[in-house]
Amino acid sequence: MGRGPQRRKKFHRGDTHLKKRWRTKRRKRDLDQIDGDLKEENTAKLLHQEVDEDKPGGGQHYCLHCARYFIDTDALQRHFRTKVHKRRLKALEIEPYSIEESERAGGIGTFIPPKKRKMKTQPVDDGTFHPEQEDADMK
Ligand SMILES: [Zn+2]
C-alpha cells in the first residue's frame, strides 16, 4: 500500500477560462466577496439601497450574483436570462471556501468534495403596490 490515494479534484475544462476572466484589470467583485454579499443581511442592503445617481438606474436594479447595476427592472430581468448570469450562478454554486479546503485536504489523502448549493436568481421587486404595507407605514 502506498501513502493513500492521491486524488485530485478534477475541474471541468470549461472552468478555467471563467477563473481567468474574474482576474481582469477592471476589478469587479471577487466571487468570495459576492459570496459574502449573498448572506441574508447583506442582500437586503444591496437590493434596497439608497438612490445613487452615479450608478446605472440610480443603483436600484442590482444583480447580486454578478455585482452589476442595471438601468431598470426590464434590463435586470433581461440580464437574468443571459448566459453570463446563468454561468455566474453555476460558478457560485460551489462554495469558495470548500474548494480551498478540499484542495488542501487532497494532499493528505482525504478528499472532501466541494459543497454544492442551489443558486437562485433573486426575486425582483416589480413595483407591485401593497396597500396594507403602505397603511402600516403611515401609522
Ligand atoms: Zn446576474
Image (spheres, rainbow, N blue to C red):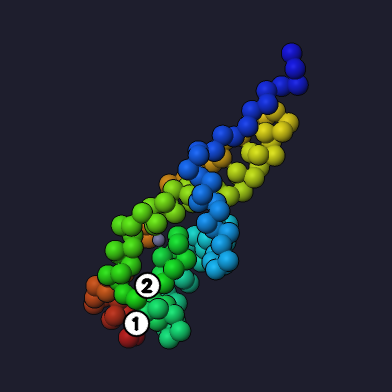
Return the x and y of residue 18 as percentages of the image width and height. Answer: 50, 51
**Mark 1 — residue?**
137
Ligand 1 location (quadrant): bottom left
Q: Is residue 120 at least partly visible in the picture?
A: no
| Frontmost residue, 124 versus 71 | 71
- Horizontal side of residue 59 vs 113, given as left or right: left
Query: Could you tell me which quadrant the N terminus lies in?
Result: top right
Query: Could you tell me which quadrant the C terminus lies in?
Result: bottom left
Q: Is residue 132 above or below residue 122?
A: below
Q: Is residue 22 above or below residue 117?
A: below
Which amino acid, by three-letter code, is at mark 1?
A: Asp
- Horizontal side of residue 2 vs 50, given as left or right: right
| Frontmost residue, 55 versus 40 | 55
**Kind of element beneath mark 1:** helix
Give the label, 2 or 1, closer to the camera. 2
What residue is drawn where x is 51% and y is 49%?
Answer: 17
Q: Residue furthest top?
A: 1
- Horizontal side of residue 122 vs 22, given as left or right: left
What residue is drawn where x is 42% and y is 51%?
Answer: 87
Image mark for residue 70: 2
Q: CA distance from mark 2 to mark 1?
A: 28 Å
What residue is drawn where x is 46% and y is 84%?
Answer: 54
Q: Is residue 115 above or below residue 32?
A: above
What residue is drawn where x is 30% and y is 64%?
Answer: 77
Q: Is residue 93 at least partly visible in the picture?
A: yes
Return the x and y of residue 31 as percentages of the image width and height. Answer: 54, 57
